[in-house]
Structure formats: structure tokens, C-alpha cells
């Protein structure tokens, strides 16, 4: 009856609302479904209302659903619909077999599309970069974190820093440390003073081979510039006050005091 579009009945929405109620205190809520909420310009889920009087879209907004992951349209896409980030992923066997990696780091989602059978595999979860992240790109902490997998085991994970404009290496390859014996997570401090448009490269060596992941990292100079400007303004202000004082003392005529006035009258 509804053809290409999805449909949610009142009974289904009652169940959906009861499930959302269980997780309403969570920072982020993920919902998985076959049909995307909307796929502009011609597609949108048709929804009845739950017993509370809310339709599918109102429930998502009421319970602050963060991400809605779906398929159906056979496309890899991101878009916001009613404050909900909708992520669609192509069918598994399309393009030689692809799938999506999703991670959450400091409540920020990173994602990438990878090919089946390509090993090792990895995704940079922090710092944020437009290659993987959809959302806030502000740097929260200067840490590099990488998720890496290989069915034959990971041998090493290293990182290096390059200048995007001039394409030369700024920092030699440094190792990341595995921070958990149970999780495939590696971490390193980004302890460098370089600013501007930079390129972080991560080299993952596994039993199946080697790959390099890249992330453009724009570390703004604003903070340094602001402190430098404030210092310069302070120095200039102090210098200006001292100069005015010197000029006042040496070049401006002094007012005669009372004894000087009397001496002048006598003469």
C-alpha cells in the first residue's frame, strides 16, 4: 500500500516509545531501522501516532535521539532531518562489498566506509577531522586515538605529522600505545607546537599487511595569537605611559611652587 516509503502503525510506535523511555537518560541514543526517516526530495516515513499522541518524528525529538542508521535507498549519505542525524549505508554487496565503521569518542561520532576483506583496518576517532567526523570539529583534547583491527593481529601503530601546504614531514614516525588489552584502541599525545593546516598520518602494520590513514588537522593559531596580542598591547601600553612620563618631566614646563613665586616677585 505504501510502496517505497516506510510506515509505522500506532502499535509499533507504542513499542518504540517504551524502548526510548528505557534510555532517555543516556547522552547519545542510536536507532537502527531499515527505512530512513527521510530521503529528500521524495521520501519520508509515514507515521501514525502513539498512545501519547506523538508521531515517529515527535518521539525522536522528545527523547533526543541522536543518530538514526538505516539502509533501503542503497546510498551512503548524511543529512539532518528535524534535528536528527540520519546516516544511510549502501547495500553490503555493492561496489565489491562495503560496510560502515562507526565509533563514538567524547560523544562525537566518527565513521568511514571500508571494503570487505581489506586488512588491516582502522579509523581515527580523535582528534576530529572532516574525513571521518560529522559534526563539531573543535579540539577537546590534544590526543590521537585510533581503533585498529586485523584478524592476524596488529604489529604496530605509528603516527607522523606533515605540512599540507609544503607536503614535507614535520615529525618522524612515533608509536601509539595500546591502552587496553581487551579493546583495539591505541593512543598517543599530540605534543607538538606546530599550528595551521596539518596532516596527521597513521600507519597500521598488521599480519595481513599495512595501511595508512590520513586526517587533516587544523589547529588554530588564534589562542596563541590572542595571548601574544594581549602581551604586545600591554607592553605598548606600559611603554606609552613611560614615554608620556618622560616627556612630561623633561619637555613640559613645570609649574613654579610658592617659594619660586615669591623669589620672582622680589626680583
Image (cartoon, rainbow, N blue to C red):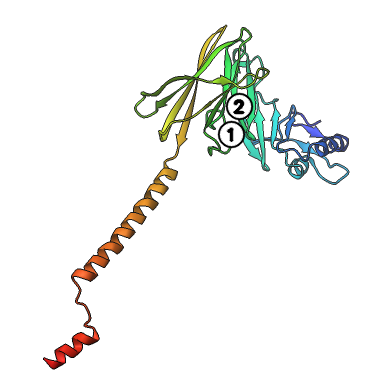
Q: Name the residue located 66 percent from the left edge and 20 percent from the top edge.
A: 183
> What residue is shown with label 2?
111
Q: Quadrant of residue 109?
A: top right
Q: Residue 248 at x, y = what percent?
A: 24, 70
Q: Which quadrant is home to the C terminus?
A: bottom left
Q: Which quadrant is home to the N terminus?
A: top right
| Element under disc 2 | strand
Q: In the shown orientation, is residue 238 left or right of residue 205? A: left
> What residue is shown with label 1?
134
Query: Crowding at label 1, few (<14), some or many (≥20) Cα neighbours within 10 Å?
Result: some
Given contact means CB atoms under 8 Å apart, are the residues at marks 1 and 2 in contact?
A: yes
State the separation of the CA atoms marked 1 and 2.
8 Å
Q: Is tag 1's residue or tag 2's residue first in the polypeptide sequence?
A: 2
Q: Residue 98 at x, y = what percent?
A: 62, 17
Q: Quadrant of residue 62?
A: top right
| Element under disc 1 | loop
Q: Is residue 244 above or below residue 128?
A: below
Amino acid at each position: 500500500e505504501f510502496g517505497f516509503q516506510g510506515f509505522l502503525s500506532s502499535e509499533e510506535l507504542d513499542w518504540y516509545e517504551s524502548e526510548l523511555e528505557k534510555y532517555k537518560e543516556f547522552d547519545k541514543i542510536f536507532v537502527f531501522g531499515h527505512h530512513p526517516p527521510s530521503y529528500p526530495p521524495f521520501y519520508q516515513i509515514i507515521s501514525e501516532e502513539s498512545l501519547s499522541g506523538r508521531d515517529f518524528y515527535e518521539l525522536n525529538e522528545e527523547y533526543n535521539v541522536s543518530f538514526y542508521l538505516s539502509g533501503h535507498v542503497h546510498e551512503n549519505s548524511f543529512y539532518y532531518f528535524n534535528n536528527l542525524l540520519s546516516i544511510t549505508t549502501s547495500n553490503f554487496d555493492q561496489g565489491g562489498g562495503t560496510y560502515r565503521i562507526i565509533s563514538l569518542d567524547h560523544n562525537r561520532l566518527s565513521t568511514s566506509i571500508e571494503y570487505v576483506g581489506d586488512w588491516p583496518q582502522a579509523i581515527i576517532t580523535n582528534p576530529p577531522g572532516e574525513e571521518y567526523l560529522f559534526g563539531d570539529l573543535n579540539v577537546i583534547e590534544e590526543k590521537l586515538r585510533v581503533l585498529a583491527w586485523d584478524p592476524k593481529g596488529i604489529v604496530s601503530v605509528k603516527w607522523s605529522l606533515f605540512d599540507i601546504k609544503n607536503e614535507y614531514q614535520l615529525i618522524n614516525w612515533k608509536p601509539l600505545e595500546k591502552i587496553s588489552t581487551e579493546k583495539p584502541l591505541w593512543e598517543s599525545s599530540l605534543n607538538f607546537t606546530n599550528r595551521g593546516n596539518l596532516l596527521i598520518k597513521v600507519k597500521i602494520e598488521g599480519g595481513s599487511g599495512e595501511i595508512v590513514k590520513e586526517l587533516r588537522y587544523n589547529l588554530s593559531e588564534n589562542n596563541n595569537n590572542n595571548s601574544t596580542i594581549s602581551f604586545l598591547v600591554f607592553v605598548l601600553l606600559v611603554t606609552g605611559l613611560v614615554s608620556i612620563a618622560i616627556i612630561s618631566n623633561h619637555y613640559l614646563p613645570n609649574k613654579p611652587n610658592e617659594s619660586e613665586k615669591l623669589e620672582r616677585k622680589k626680583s
